[in-house]
Amino acid sequence: MGKYLLRRILQMIPVVIGTTLLIYALVFALPGDPVAAMFGDKPVNAAVAAQIRSEYNLDKPFIIQYLIFLKNALTLDFGNTFAGQPVIAVIGRAFPVTIKLAIMAFVFEAVFGVVFGIISGLKKGKWYDSVILIVSLLLISVPTFVTGFVLQYFLGVKWGLLPVTAGSNPGFIDLLMPASVLGSVSMAYIIRLTRTEVSSNISEDYVRTARAKGMSNKSVTLRHVLRNSMIPVVTYLGADIGALMGGAMITERIFNINGIGNTLYQGIIRGEGTLVVSIVTILVLVFVVCNLVVDMFYAVLDPRIRYV
Amino acid sequence: MQKSSKLTVVVAALSAAVMSLSACGGSSDTASTDTSTSGNTDQVMSVYGCEPANPLIPTNTNEVCGGNPIDLLFAKLVAYDDKGKTENEVAKEIKASDENKKFTITLNDGWKFTDGTAVTAESFTKAWSYGANVSNAQLSSSFFQNIVGFSDLQKKGVDKNAQLSGLKVVDDKTFTVDLTSPSSVFPTSLGYSAFAPLPDSFFKDPKAFGEKPVGNGPYKFESWTHNDSIKLVKNDDYKGVAPAHNGGITFKMYTDTEPAYADVQAGNLDALETVPASASQTFTTDSSVQAYNKAGSVFQSFSFPATLKHFELGTKEGTLRRQAVSMAINRKQLVDKVLGGIGTPAVDFISPVIPGYSDSLKGNGVLKYNKDEAKKLWAEADEISKWTDSDKLTFAYNTDGGAKPVYDAIVNQVKNTLGINVATNPIPTFSEFRNSITARTMKSAFRTGWQADYPSAENYLSPLYSSAAADGKGSNDGDYKNSEFDALLTKAATASDEDTANESYHAAEELLLRDLPSVPLYYSNAAGVAAKGVKGFKMNWKNLPVYQELTK
């Protein structure tokens, strides 16, 4: 187990270096000159532009720029944004907000997804099974920005039930609507996944055997059916944490949440290589760690799985 | 029964998670709404804002996110009223001599920065020199290029504290400015934020100042929470021409205008100076907001590269084809149907809200939709050099600025009128778009727009069409070079009063109407919304709310 963990952690090093290099190259290859763009429609003063380029090392070749970035990143110095803000401070402000949003969305989708999925799977064919199926189908087929705008208009603007936008330091109430929107699609998938798993496991031989041995319906469902049904669901949830953090761009824009998604968007628009790469690096780490945790979870759910 | 009990457990767990989350969320939900009696002069008004791209330093800010707060924080030598008329503010007198090549500026007494220090002649000369000096890498440095000594400050490695030699301090309240070339518009341009005075504390630590600026304007800086808000409060010591009627202005930051519009609808935001595309057709009839929609100062056009095949600048064929394309466009229809009425069809090269505008220029018929004439001119051009079936006219625009529907419509109009092969050439980002224009690699007609920095015909004409700004030296992207036009601009620059100057500008515009280096389309309206119950919501010549007059 320990050996396995160590190996997995060591594997993260090439993954991180590879992704940062790739992202750095992509940002570098973006057409357009961020320094010229800073002048907007106004004439570019070449002398000033040169000064700014040398300040941000933009006049150096790509690989040198990348090595400088890597060297500084090792000492946790990610440089400054064009606005003169330390990148680390910008991320430090945005990340807690995104984490809050992602946790709320995660809890929302995990709880409601699993609960409705189980209800549906156990009582297949009942009227509420059909309702749950139809609603989940609807959520999957409608893009989040539509769900977002519609909820924002009715719940926020029209009826005034929830805050319309969240701002930079949002509380629980502010994030209630954005988190439900963000988690809604995944929730629908989890409902369907859980439902399929539960309904197929319930007719398995081992369930029939357990029943024949005289176990109560409750413990059969909880200890056998559910436990075995959770493996694919946990896999999906684990991968989704990363997606919730990095993929909140649309939701964050609709509800004006100043989290990672919005910051990343601004970084891309302004061509701020270091900001984009730093954020992506952190997201990569989140993904890698989540995957590791999910793999660990398998053993808990299914004792047959061993790590060597 | 079993099931329901399970659900209760789940709900309890969820609300426990929720509690801990809200605990770390702090108390932000109180900040968003303000309800109070109407017209309260202590009321802090919340307005749309966005995260500045640069520190809040006047000479280093050239975009609206930082520009709007800066404009309220600093009083300049002159100020513009809502109509774009210039009046003295910090300046008592600006006296021109030597045919508008030398200006003597005297300051009014009693002006103070909010840190208590006096506004002196040096507050201006040192600030301008700082802005012009290349070692300080200020984005607005080009505003000082007409001041004597500018080129000396452009050399690599020049001392950070080196001053412009054309600025001479006579005494505490007087200084003189020597210009390289005459400029009658110089006093007007002094109201642009790059010409703001700076206190001594700035030069000691520009970096700290950029986070916490100290000015002399109608508002005093209170705080800047990045990506959240910039808070300004009323400056009680301000004695200028546009005092605040409210207690302060809070710029609430957004990355998109859609949520800001929703916040105005819900009453959480007092004013928004633009209208998101999704609401452009409905905002004037939306009962949950107050709408404002009048002709504005942003000039929208498209330009042809000087050497674009069949459209070459200055050739008979090129001119005929440029005119034909211009007459093939139905501007009225474009504005009404595509823009939902938030534009006004162009009849000149300036804007209806700027002094010097004229709707009766000779030759402005070329900006009117005329199907038959367009076809005739196109056919005439065909006799000089045939437009074949393989030729294609394309229109380039940046897709990140909402220009797509406009250019789709233009393409259809030109195609239907002239019956030729026309298409759009969408370019993903503004930066990439500007890059290929600056590098002169653009092989399409391309979108050009201009927002004036100060309300003057000069600011619409010389940066865009003078020979001095061509070939990458300025914003003359179509490389228009016409000595007759330049001579008229010079004549206007040496004119003794504004009316004489405007006569020359009109003559210059008539040349543009003939040659069409760029084709005027429409003036973007000053369109915005305010929440119900907000008073004094109107917009100025810059298409911005008159922040000082907002109350509720």
Image: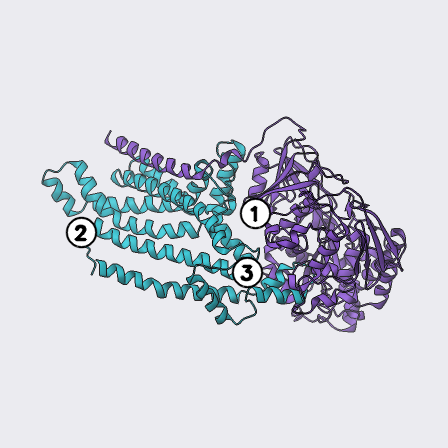
**Amino acid on which the number 3 mark rests in the picture:** Gly
Q: Residue furthest left?
A: A213
Q: Relative to A270, does residue A99 appear above or below in the rendering?
A: above
Q: Can I make out residue B54 in this image?
A: no
In the rendered structure, the answer to whether residue A129 lies left or right of residue A279 reads left
Circle 3 chain: A
Circle 1 chain: B
The chain drawn in cyan is A
In space, the residues marked 3 and 1 are separated at their CA atoms by 18 Å
Q: Residue furthest front?
A: B171
Q: Nearer the viewer, mark 3 or mark 1?
A: 3
Q: Which mark is residue B256?
A: 1
Q: Position of residue B239 (x, y in %)?
A: 75, 39
Q: Secondary structure at mark 3?
A: loop
Image label count: 3
Q: Quadrant of the N terminus of chain A?
A: bottom left
Q: Position of residue B483 (x, y in %)?
A: 84, 68
Q: Position of residue A136 (x, y in %)?
A: 37, 42
Residue pictured at 85% horizontal, 62% vertical = B490
Q: Kindly check if marks 1 and 2 are in contact, taking CB atoms under 8 A apart as contact.
A: no
The chain drawn in purple is B
Q: Quadrant of the C terminus of chain A?
A: bottom left
- According to the picture, the residue beneath numbered tag 2 turns out to be A303
Q: Kindly check if marks 3 and 1 are in contact, taking CB atoms under 8 A apart as contact.
A: no
Taking depth in this image into account, of B405 and B503 the one nearest to the observer is: B503
- The answer as to whether the residues below labels 1 and 2 share one chain is no
- According to the picture, the residue beneath numbered tag 3 turns out to be A271
Q: Relative to A287, does residue B281 appear above or below in the rendering?
A: above
